[in-house]
Amino acid sequence: MKGSIRIGSLFGIPFYINPSWFFVLGLVTLTYGADLGQLFPQLGVIFPWVLGFLAAILLFSSVLAHELGHSFVAIAQGIPVKSITLFIFGGLATLEKESETPLQAFLVAIAGPVVSLLLFVLFAIISTSVPLSEPIEAIVSLLATINLVLALFNLIPGLPLDGGNVLKSIVWKITGNPNKGVIFAGRVGQAFGWLAVIMGGLAVIGVSPIGSVWTLFIGLFLLQNAGFAAQSATVSEKLSSYTAEDAVLEDSPIVSANLTLREFVNDYVIGKDKWRKFLVINEEGQLIGEIDTEDLKQISTSKWTEITVKELIKESIDITTVKSDQSLMEVIKLIETENLRELAVVQEDGVLVGLLEKTSIINLLQQEAEAKAI
């Protein structure tokens, strides 16, 4: 999350606080401190604010425990956790990757609400069974209520909430397609977002007693994030329907090993500045190496008609290869993970299909969009 401040690590997980968190920390401290001061005048002037601050810290500790619940289950599945961030609307555990099965996704999603429900039970038992001073009992009761609300709110079946991820895993299980799960849960999240915006808006203008300005903000938050999730899943679904072969460049820099250097220069280099490296194939069309136009300087031009490309190639190919039938979504993940600029696409028998770049994937999607628009 942009602008977040790293304050350390928890169980090896980087821990961040977004500047918006300080606003809520101050708001809870002031409002609850004022309430404690009115309810318990014997506390004096300063102590209510101290207890208000303590309540705010414990409240966010509950949110942190909620996110740790997600994190620990993800780690148990072998999924690294990039970070945990606290912000104005709660917390966010960012995972390195998605779960591999619907059941694993369900367990990661439900872990947070389960932790909150357990904390609700714990604080409820403490507040009713342990002798406490009235101000401390009020704080413990508040924490019980907050954790119950946190659990129930997050179980709303729409992304980006935990309930949305639970719904995603269920749809994934039914359809066998994780993207369909994200799209469906994202649409439901948008529906709840619109409902919250309408309720909050009506409350702000005094038409409805239900809702508040916070309801409006939460609705906008749901709309933005649910829409983004659904849009991303739609793109992923589209990419999954293509293979690497579909996105190869039409003018891929491929030359035959049997060409003389003169033929190579005349046909592929002179007047063509786009490529400096070319992939070299044998008579069967299999990738056997690459040639750099800079290497031509090593050979006298008088010998270009006698020497073939094969004699000048580098057999150690400095390019990653992917199978032609590999999903384009998998290719995108490989490009992003390895920070690659280009890939060579080959068939099972090693026959080179062509070169693939990020731009060729973008062009493929644009062509499809234009075709649908006609």
Image (spheres, rainbow, N blue to C red):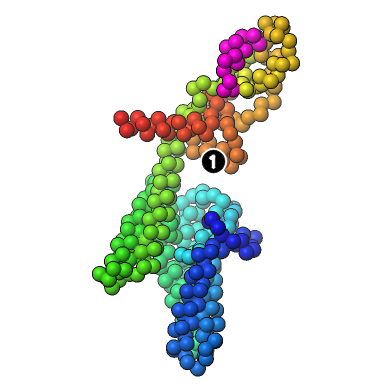
Image coordinates of residue 310 in percent, x first then y, are 67, 14
Q: Nearer the viewer, residue 140 or 212?
A: 212
Determine the residue located farthest toward the left in the rendered image: 207
Is residue 95 in view from this perspective?
yes
Element under disc 1: helix
Q: Residue type at mark 1: give it.
A: Lys
Magenta region, residue range: 258-275
Q: Is residue 324 left or right of residue 160?
A: right
- Which residue is located at x 28 percent, y 73 percent? 209
324 vs 195: above or below: above
> How many numbered discs?
1
Image coordinates of residue 223 in percent, x first then y, are 38, 56
Q: Nearer the viewer, residue 253 or 286?
A: 253
Image coordinates of residue 31 in percent, x first then y, are 45, 79
Q: Is residue 290 left or right of residue 361?
A: right
Q: Report crowding for label 1: few under 14, some 14 to 19, many 20 or more residues within 10 A (C-alpha).
A: few
